[in-house]
Amino acid sequence: MVKDEKVDAYNKNPQGAASASGSSSSSAESSSKSPTVPEESMKNISVKQLVRAKHTLQQRIKRQNETEEQKVLRRQRNAELNRKRRQNKEDIRVTIEKTKNRLRQRIKREIDRMLRTRQKRDDFLRETFEQMATVFADEDMLQYQERVAHVLWEISKASGGAHGTENSAASNATDRRVS
């Protein structure tokens, strides 16, 4: 019954489905025009719709001529295909879920690593400024604090560049101020 509705969806004329299964006495009429679809409706139907309707009708005729054994075999085959399709969907869902979990773990590890690195840098800066506070006056502290922060920013920005030159420049400036 559901298939009848599909064919009707392709046929613009609701009588088309009934006349498609009609007797062969209308062969004289079919030579002049299509027995299932009026000619004015043919202009509005695409080739794709016609191919689908033809296939649907062929399948219906084929199923009408099936024996009971063939029906059982077809139903078993369809049930197996549906089971495989559902299993594939489940496998895909599980794979996607595993991938999401791996990505979540990776992001969590990266965030933890970044936070540890930031904490180390903050600890280093705090200790450095505490040590500098014991040696320098407040005016000098502000000046060196800005320079050290800039140098550390450049070091962290560069990925393995010339670390030695920046560090030595900062330490040379510090040495000159102390002496």
Image (cartoon, rainbow, N blue to C red):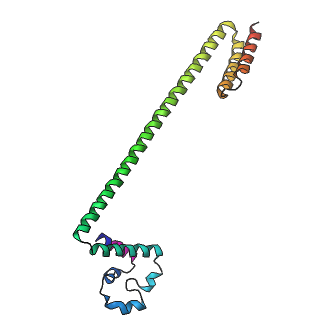
Q: On the picture, is 134 further left or further right than 106?
A: right
Residue at (53% x, 26% y) in the render = 113
Q: Position of residue 13 (x, y in %)?
A: 37, 81
Give the answer, above or below, for where 157 lies relative to 76.
above
Residues 124 and 72: in front is 72
Give the answer, above or below, for where 86 lies relative to 166.
below
Give the answer, above or below, for where 6 lies relative to 86.
below
Question: How many numbered marks have been drawn onto this rendered protein structure?
Answer: 0
Where are the magenta residues, as a range? 4-11
Q: Is residue 12 magenta?
A: no
Q: Position of residue 106 (x, y in %)?
A: 49, 33
Residues 136 and 15: in front is 15
Position of the C terminus by quadrant: top right
Q: Where is residue 73 in the image (x, y as percent from the top left)?
A: 27, 64
Q: Quadrant of residue 53?
A: bottom left
Residues 48 and 129: in front is 48
Q: Residue furthest bottom?
A: 28
Residue at (69% x, 22% y) in the render = 163
Q: Main secondary structure of the magenta part?
A: helix
Q: On the picture, is 93 further left or further right than 167?
A: left
Q: In which quarter of the image is residue 134?
A: top right
Position of the N terminus by quadrant: bottom left
Give the answer, above or below, for where 118 lies relative to 4.
above
Residue at (45% x, 84% y) in the render = 40
Residues 27 and 153: in front is 27
Q: Which residue lies furthest to the left in this view?
A: 68
